Image: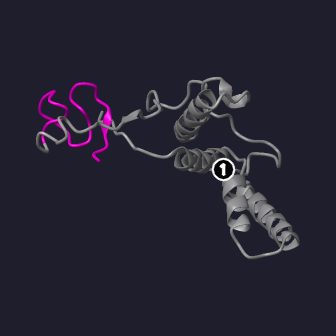
């Protein structure tokens, strides 16, 4: 199976995790889309009272959606985090992201512990990208394919010796 790397800032990573958490919870019958709805209301030019009114209206519509998609669930019931492969896989991704952020930022909350095993797509790995600014060798770059005289750069973004991200000045 191919593997990919995505470079994100911490804020972008939180956005991805929050959106995936909304999707995971929605698919499990917790149809609030809490983060998405809050951001939509927060970023509009409406009064606080109007935002509360709209959130209540959305809540009623979401309950109707839940009754349509998951009629076997009672109003306050939801599926487990690993009931379907889709729910389990999305849970695994968002939960692993939030666990990484909790570890990196010394949070003491539910995300301080790793995600429970779930889904069927394998392990999710989230790690902090270490970047290094490489200085000029002898006041000049040797050429565009060499970094600090360690040899040819096989990827224009990473040093062949240490693997650090190269940020050319």
Circle 1: element type: helix
Report the colour scheme: one colour
Choose between 44 and 89: the one closer to the eye. 44
Residue occupying image coordinates x 76% and y 45%: 73
In the rendered image, the residue lying farthest to the bottom is 45
Residue occupying image coordinates x 30% and y 33%: 1
For residue 72, side relative to residue 148 (left or right): right
Residue 164: give x, y in percent of width and height. Answer: 32, 32
In the rendered structure, does residue 158 fall within the stretch colored magenta? yes
Q: Quadrant of residue 84?
A: top right
Q: Which residue is mark 1?
A: 26
Residue 96: give x, y in percent of width and height. Answer: 55, 32
Q: Quadrant of residue 57?
A: bottom right
In the rendered image, the residue lying farthest to the right is 49
For residue 58, side relative to residue 83 (left or right): right
Residue 66: give x, y in percent of width and height. Answer: 72, 55
Q: Quadrant of residue 141?
A: top left
Residue 167: give x, y in percent of width and height. Answer: 31, 43
In the rendered structure, does residue 143 fall within the stretch colored magenta? no
Q: In the rendered view, tell whether residue 113 sits above or below residue 23.
A: above
Q: Which residues are magenta?
A: 145-169
> Predominant secondary structure in magenta?
loop
For residue 43, side relative to residue 16 (left or right): right
């Amino acid at each position: 199976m191919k593997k990919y790397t995505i470079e994100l800032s911490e804020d972008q990573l939180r956005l991805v995790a929050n959106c995936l958490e909304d999707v995971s919870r929605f698919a499990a019958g917790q149809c609030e889309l809490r983060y998405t709805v809050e951001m939509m209301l927060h970023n509009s030019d409406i009064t606080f009272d109007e935002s509360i009114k709209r959130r209540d209206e959305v809540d009623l519509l979401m309950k109707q959606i839940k009754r349509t998609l998951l009629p076997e669930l009672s109003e306050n019931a939801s599926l487990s985090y690993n009931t379907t492969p889709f729910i389990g896989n999305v849970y695994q991704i968002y939960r692993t992201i939030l666990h990484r952020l909790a570890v990196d930022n010394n949070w003491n909350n539910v995300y301080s512990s790793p995600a429970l095993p779930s889904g069927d797509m394998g392990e999710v790995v989230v790690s902090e990208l270490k970047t290094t600014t490489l200085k000029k060798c002898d006041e000049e770059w040797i050429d565009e394919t060499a970094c600090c005289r360690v040899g040819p750069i096989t990827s224009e973004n990473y040093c062949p010796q240490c693997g650090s991200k190269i940020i050319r000045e």
